[in-house]
Image: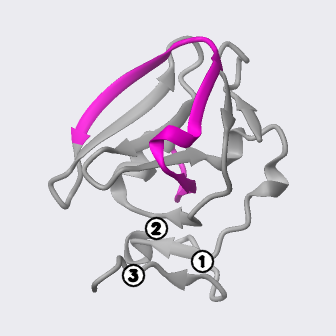
Amino acid sequence: MTGACFCKAIKYEVLAESMMQGLCYCADCQTVGGSAYWASYAISPEQFRLTSGELKKYTSRSAAGRAVERHFCGDCGTQIKVQSNDVSVASVNAMTFDDPTHFRPQYTHFAQSAPHWCDVHPKLSPFQPPGE
């Protein structure tokens, strides 16, 4: 599966099917993406490969206290992936896929943080981390 940023300076491949696909409504994803949610195609970091360009990285702390790396195109600003090395997960922006029909969300994350004007799809299950 392949994808690219808005200006096409960044191109990438995803080398495996996702572990899970979902919509994240956390405040960080809303702020960075300028939308109600992030379209997350979760894979292990090793399953993501750049084929063109170089990503810029910004690291912040999540509400859970984990370091979260956000990877962007330095030219057009498209966020390509979010990665947490603490849990060994890379979340690829499914809206940057060359063929977005590969994205089939099943879960919601932080749906309680969805804006009041945004309806959370009732067929999507709330994500429950393993062991909780």
Residue hosting label 1: 119
Instruction: Tell me where residue 124 appears, x and y as whole percent.
Output: 61, 82
Kindly indicate the quadrant of the structure image that contains residue 83: top left
Work out how far the residue at label 3 is from the one at label 2, CA to CA, in angstroms.
21 Å
- The label nearer to you, 3 versus 2, is 3
Kindly indicate the quadrant of the structure image that contains residue 96: top right
Work out how far the residue at label 1 is from the one at label 3, CA to CA, in angstroms.
20 Å
Residue hosting label 2: 115
Residue at x 52% of width, y 59% of height: 36
- The label nearer to you, 1 versus 3, is 3
On residue 16, which mark appears? none
User: Amino acid under label 1?
Assistant: Asp
User: Amino acid under label 3?
Assistant: Gln
Q: Is 131 left or right of 29, judged from the image as shown? A: left
Residue hosting label 3: 128
Residue at x 53% of width, y 23% of height: 77
Label 3 secondary element: loop
Q: Nearer the viewer, residue 31 or 43?
A: 43
Q: Is residue 53 above or below residue 106?
A: above
Residue at x 26% of width, y 32% of height: 59
- Nearer the N terminus, badge 1 or badge 3? 1
Instruction: Tell me where residue 114 appears, x and y as whole percent.
Output: 45, 70
Q: Is 31 left or right of 50, judged from the image as shown? A: left
Label 1 secondary element: loop
Instruction: Tell me where residue 88 appears, x and y as whole percent.
Output: 36, 50
Q: Which residues are the magenta region?
A: 34-60
Crowding around mark 2 (Cα neighbors within 10 Å: few <14, some 14 to 19, many 20+) is some
Crowding around mark 3 (Cα neighbors within 10 Å: few <14, some 14 to 19, many 20+) is few
Instruction: Tell me where residue 48 appears, x and y as whole percent.
Output: 57, 36
Q: Can residue 7 be seen?
A: yes
Q: Nearer the viewer, residue 117 or 26?
A: 26
